[in-house]
Amino acid sequence: MVEEKFYKSILYWAKRYVQKFGFSVIPVGQDKKPLIPWKEYQTRYPKDEELEAWFSDGKNNIAIVTGPISEIAVLDIDGEEGLEAIKKNKLYLPPAPCVKTGRGYHYYFKYQDGVRNFTKRYPGIDLRGEGGYVLAPPSLHPSGTIYEWIIPLEETLPELPDWVLNEKEKIKEREPGWVEKLLEGVEEGQRNDSLTRLAGHYFGKGLGFEETKLILLDWNKRNRPPLPEKEVIRTVESIYRRDTMNKLQKDEAIKIEGYETTDLWNSDNFVKAYKGKLLHCEEWNCWLIYRNGKWVRDNTNETLALGKKIILSYYYIASQIEDDKERNKLVKHALKSSTQRAINAMIELSKSDLAVTPDDFDKDPYIINLKNGTLNLETLEFWNHRPEDLLTRQMNVEYDPTATCPRWLSFLNRIFDQNRNLIEFIQKALGYSLTGDTGEDCLFILYGTGQNGKTTFLRTISEIWGDYALDTPTETLLVKERDNIPNDIARLRGARLVTSSESQEGRRFNEILIKKLTGRDRITARFLRQEFFEFDPTFKIWIATNHKPVVRENSIAFWRRIRLIPFTVQIPNEEVIPNFEKILLEEKEGIFNWILEGFRKWKENRLGIPEEIKKATQEYRDEMDVLAEFISTMCIENPEIKSTTKELYQAYCKWCEENSEEPINIRAFGRRLEERGYKAVRTGKNRERGWEGIGLKTQQTDQEEVTETF
């Protein structure tokens, strides 16, 4: 039974380590030795086909390569001996993801530069850093024990404890103050060694060639006697190239064939190296980087760092050139290209070759990006992340077709009182909201007086939607006192789920904007101090509120869009669980599968409107119909009655004032009467504009008094 479980999960875990956590992995045998030459996997990740070849039959163990490539360092605590050493030496071991091994434990920490393997510093305690690897679950120990996570692995790892970092410093420790001492100047016989040490020190601190050269030329003046200036520069260049090549061997040098000495050549190299990794959007005025399965804006100037890496690669190329003249020519070009002007020119010239427009991103309304790959909602085809899909958003969920969500279903049954019509509608509405399709032209209002689950519901689905969800202030959808720059509308571009919570009582919907946002026509918007742009709406709006926003428009064009979902069950205080959405989100993969089934149902039968929602929406419409209330209170309806527009409208305005209602203008008043079936006529001696079939109750009273007189 153990072996069967082991064989089924080994390939899954290998892919999970690479794709979810960014670890490099290699196959190892039962003797814990690598089954392949593995040095290259210290600088690159294995490809899918390599993982399939190594692990598809489940017979090999998995080892995670530690150090810079995986950005982890692992403490190996070997059984009782290691635990006793921790206790005896009072070594602090912070909480960290932990694996139970055959004889002890592996604790996973965030890697720090320069942390290498060490052993025998303390009995039973080893560190695996740069140049190391550790066996990972569900590998099989020679004893027959399966490696397993006893404290789950997280994407964010804790820092290494101080005592480990102190061991790192001991490896390269120099006497305190050695830099300051050397900078005072040295005697003949110490100059070259001191120059080498100082140059290495400054390059290690991140200083560039020019800065280091100037510092050391100034230092050289204090030597007794100074070295020739050319010798200082030549030594600094040599150490800079060596330091650069060491970094390139660790990070993997950019592969470049042939060479020239122009900005355009630099640009060509930049484009070749980062095609599929970098894009430039002129309209957004930014670079985008492909990271973790999606394109993200470069807000940390990583593009500049990648540009520097191109220039550093020239030193590696130069080291492979045998001809002294040609080698020196390329080194000279590398030094010339290390200036800010040259690097900026290279990046600027590359923009046109890596250009993209906003409309190129997220184009297919039925493609959804997940944490572990990309899914076609219509065909259920699932594939690994690809830069060419041009996806900028990602749901906060992995695709696992076997996952279920019993707690979520129980939650829905509770808040909707087991009403199958409402629950199925919710399922289809969420399935529809997975897409970029806006063909239903509707807005969802979750209405209830409080403590009924609607906020928990909205927070849960918003978390699952990840980057595809945006929360917008309720103000976005309401009438404002003055026109503002539509910055809040501009940021909705590309979203598929837009949520908003709570509105103040008595605030009014911006009906014109609602119709625009729930339609299919392109929307015009702009960010502050930027040009206007157009985009296609892809989002569905979900509002959770205790107060129904006021609506003054009674048109079919508006009300056909409203889906008011009633939350009528109030949860007793003793049943309320704080932050219950966090508990529900433990089933997020299963909830996604349930929503995916909702997409299938929506695609087959469209959304439809259950009677419960029709009734709730109609009640909402009736509440908002101020004119209907005026007619029922102040008017009579009779085919024989005629009244003038003037007297009806004056009575209406007076009634609105008395009831603190805002009247509509006289033209809209006429349209509303015509929509209700009253006929426009000419009436009275002066043939004034009026209406047939409606009159004021005062007219009826006057008529009765006339009849009594006769």
Image: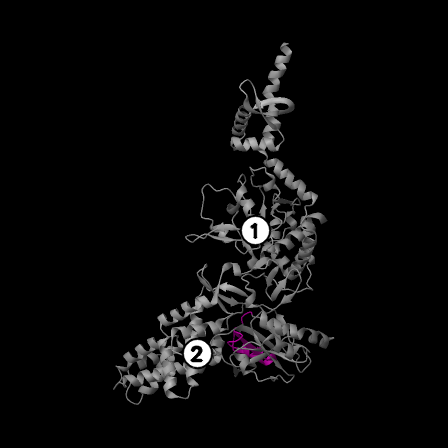
- Is residue 88 in the magenta section? yes
Which residue does the numbered mark 2 point to in the structure image? 313
Instruction: Identify the mark nearer the N-term, 1 or 2.
Output: 2
Q: Nearer the viewer, residue 531 or 177?
A: 531
Which residue does the numbered mark 1 point to in the structure image? 499
Which residue corresponds to the image point at 64% horizontal and 39% vertical from the top-left?
618
- Mark 2 lies on a secondary structure that is helix
Instruction: Rate crowding at label 1 as few (under 14), some (14 to 19) or many (20 or more) other CA atoms within 10 Å.
Output: many
Question: From the viewer's perspective, is 109 left or right of 243?
Answer: right
Give the residue type at disc 2.
Ser
Residue 527 in view of the camera: yes
Figure quadrant of the N terminus: bottom right
Q: Is residue 486 above or below residue 58?
A: above
Identify the magenta region: 67-95
Which residue is farthest bottom? 189
Give the residue type at disc 1.
Thr
Indicate the quadrant where residue 232 lies: bottom left
Q: Are marks 1 and 2 in contact (CB under 8 Å)?
A: no
Which residue is farthest right? 1
Indicate the quadrant where residue 154 lies: bottom right
Question: From the viewer's perspective, is 491 left or right of 529?
Answer: right
Question: From the viewer's perspective, is 466 left or right of 614?
Answer: left
